[in-house]
Amino acid sequence: MKTHDIIYIAMGTALISICSWIIIPTAVPFTLQLFAIFLITTLFGGKRSIITVIVYILLGSIGIPVFSGFTGGIGILLSPLGGFIFGFIAIPLLVRCVEILPLKSKYQVTAAMILGLFICYACGVTFFLLSYHRLGTSISLGKAVSTCVLPFIIPDILKLALALFVGKRLRHHTYIK
């Protein structure tokens, strides 16, 4: 790994951390973690972004307060919403799969990010359901989806669109190898 790769990964990890601390107060509050993940994936590509998300999760798992609400620790990852954090890896992973194709387009990359978002939702809902089951409480799939996914679809698609727009603008003004 080259020095500039390490710098990009460190900057991306810091960006995800900072964006996780920014909470947008709406009827259902949300953070900007996904915006940061979409943006770094747009700017850095899948390979560096996969490593960046893994470093972010590892930092949080050892207790560094990089998660939403200045939290950290393995307890957050094992909480009912921890599956969403693990699901973040799907976004750059799918983009990387597109990048290694011989013929690729920006539409395929965007589609990979959207599919990665829905895989992130699936990981989160699955983990949410398993956590409730482990606690001896029953919750339906419909209730889990209506609680954990439906309120966030539109804001998350807007984050993706904004990240693609900002990423395109930044690429014209920066030199990222």
Image (cartoon, rainbow, N blue to C red):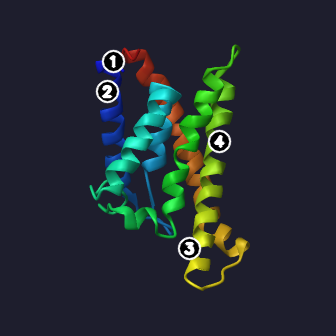
- The residue that appears at 51% across and 67% down in the rendered structure is 28
Distance CA(mark 3)–CA(mark 4): 26 Å
Residue assigned mark 1: 2
Tags 4 and 1 touching, CB below 8 Å: no
Q: Name the residue under label 2.
A: 6
* Upstream in sequence: badge 2 or badge 3: 2
Q: Earlier in the sequence, mark 4 or mark 1?
A: 1
Residue 59, position as x, y percentages in the image: 32, 49
Q: Residue 131 carries which label?
A: 3
Residue type beneath disc 4: Ile
Residue 69, horizontal then vertical, whole percent: 33, 63
Find out whether the residues at labels 2 and 1 contact each other: C-beta distance under 8 Å: yes
Q: In this view, does 141 lie above or below 169?
A: below
Residue at left offset 54%, top offset 59%: 83
The residue identified by callout 4 is 114
The quadrant holding residue 16 is top left
User: Would you identify the image quadrant in which residue 160 lies?
Assistant: top right
Q: Disc 3 vs disc 4: which is toward the camera?
A: 3
**Residue that appears at 65% across and 63% down:** 150
Are the residues at dot 4 and dot 2 in contact (C-beta closer than 8 Å)?
no
The Cα–Cα distance between marks 4 and 2, rounded to whole angstroms, is: 27 Å
Point out the tag, 3 or 4, that comes first from the N-terminus.
4
Q: Can residue 43 be seen in this view?
A: no
